[in-house]
Amino acid sequence: MALLKNDFVTIKIGKNRYRKVFLENILYCKADRAYSLIKTNNAEYSYSVSLKKTEYLFEKYSCFLRVNRSYIVNLANCIELKIGTKPELILKNGEIVHPNDAFITEIMIFFKISKTV
């Protein structure tokens, strides 16, 4: 499913408080023990759900990919891919995530890179 401009997830951010987080603003989700850290363009939210369960929130969106044990990345917010011995995904905010080799082909498809490059 393609990411629509107003698609969002709702996360609990405190006692009786919920926040609507627009998917287009999410850079990545990172595992933090039994929690997940959701990083957006201008905020971070601690979500009291494991990364495995957080992954289910994004499974219908093709731009979200679990790239290693600790990160789910919004590929739409990645601006550069470095392949080789230590692959890197560079996000819009300059942060770097190291994807596992098993996901490089899928990332290359998203970046519209042929395998012959």
Image (cartoon, grey):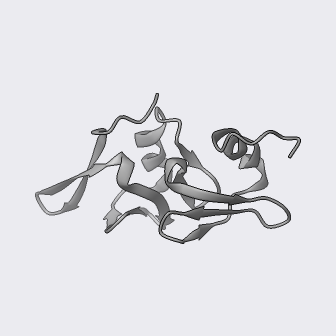
**Residue situated in front as seen by the camera: 82 or 39:** 82
Reply above or below: 116 against 11. above
* Whole-percent x, y for residue 117 in the image: 86, 46
User: Residue drawn 57% across and 58% down?
Assistant: 79
**Residue for point 49% across, 54% down:** 77
Q: Nearer the viewer, residue 2 or 114?
A: 114
Q: Residue at x 32, y 39 (%)?
A: 5
Q: Give the residue displayed 84% in from the left and 41% down from the top.
A: 115
- Kindly give the residue lying farthest to the top in the view shown: 1
Q: Residue furthest right?
A: 116
Image vertical order of residue 20 relative to residue 110, above or below: below
Looking at the picture, how far across and down is residue 6, in whole percent? 27, 39
Residue 58 location, quadrant: top left
Q: Nearer the viewer, residue 26 or 19?
A: 26
Residue 14 horizontal/vertical position (percent): 18, 64
Q: What is the residue that sits farthest to the left in this orientation?
A: 16
